[in-house]
Image (cartoon, helix red, strand yellow):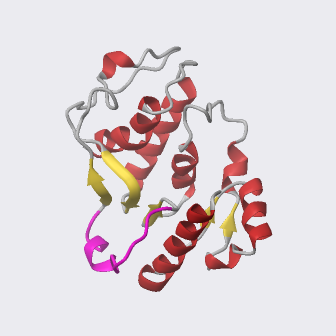
Amino acid sequence: MDDFELLTTILSALKWRQLNGNIKMITDEAGALYYQKLGIEHIWDLGIDTTLDKFRDYAIDPAIFWAAGKILALGEQKIPVAMLDTDFVAWVNLEEKLEKTKLAVIHREDIDAKIYPGVEYFNLTGNYTLPEWDWTVLPCNTAFLYINDENLKEYYTEQAINFMKITPAVFDPLTFMVFAEQRLLAMSAQ
């Protein structure tokens, strides 16, 4: 990681702790060792969780699904859960805004056909077919994600993981990842 990325990661975790409560880093053993080597593991008061190691045998291509760890980790968490990217800084206390909601994201995305194509773009293999989702629902930007609905969390993560596992070897590291992470969340919530 570049210095600016480390500084943003530290700022993100410390501001969350200051304004919103406890925080942990979810990564794999290599990530945990990296943060320990840097001497910054203490910024996450709930520690560093290496949950992602248990997904090593999943047939998910990390070149296409570079943010798959977020979805895999989310599936393992208890609700309510807030998940934030390491470059997302929460500058205010969010408790009041979140206390009566089941789902919150930082914002919705417009449907740009180059980034969010229609169902026909996804040439899927095997016995998997996409559910009958509403493809007009605006995708959710998940730089910040809050879920307080166990059924939604389970359905979304299950659908996203299944999608990532069956995706053919097509190198498209944007469209497929943002579908699994952002568009599929909106469709699942709908």
Q: Is residue 23 above or below residue 159?
A: below
Horizontally, is 114 left or right of 124 in the view? left
Residue 29 x %, y %: 76, 56
Q: Nearer the viewer, residue 73 or 39?
A: 39
Q: Nearer the viewer, residue 117 or 58?
A: 117
Horizontally, is 108 left or right of 125 in the view? left
Q: Quadrant of residue 45?
A: bottom right
Horizontally, is 5 left or right of 155 in the view? right
For the N terminus, the image quarter is bottom right
Residue 38 x %, y %: 75, 70
Asked if one can make out residue 16 in the rendered structure from this viewpoint, the answer is yes
Residue 82 x %, y %: 44, 65
Residue sitting at x 54%, y 60%: 77
Q: Main secondary structure of the magenta part?
A: loop
Say whether residue 93 is magenta: yes
Q: Is residue 134 above or below residue 23?
A: above
Which residue reaches farthest bottom?
A: 18
Residue sitting at x 36%, y 44%: 185
Residue 96 x %, y %: 27, 79
Which residue reaches farthest left?
A: 136
Q: Is residue 126 above or below residue 139?
A: above
Say whether residue 34 is magenta: no
For the C terminus, the image quarter is top left
How many numbered badges does the structure rendering display?
0
Residue sitting at x 47%, y 44%: 157
Magenta segment range?
87-101
Residue sitting at x 62%, y 31%: 61
Asked if one can make out residue 151 in the rendered structure from this viewpoint, the answer is no
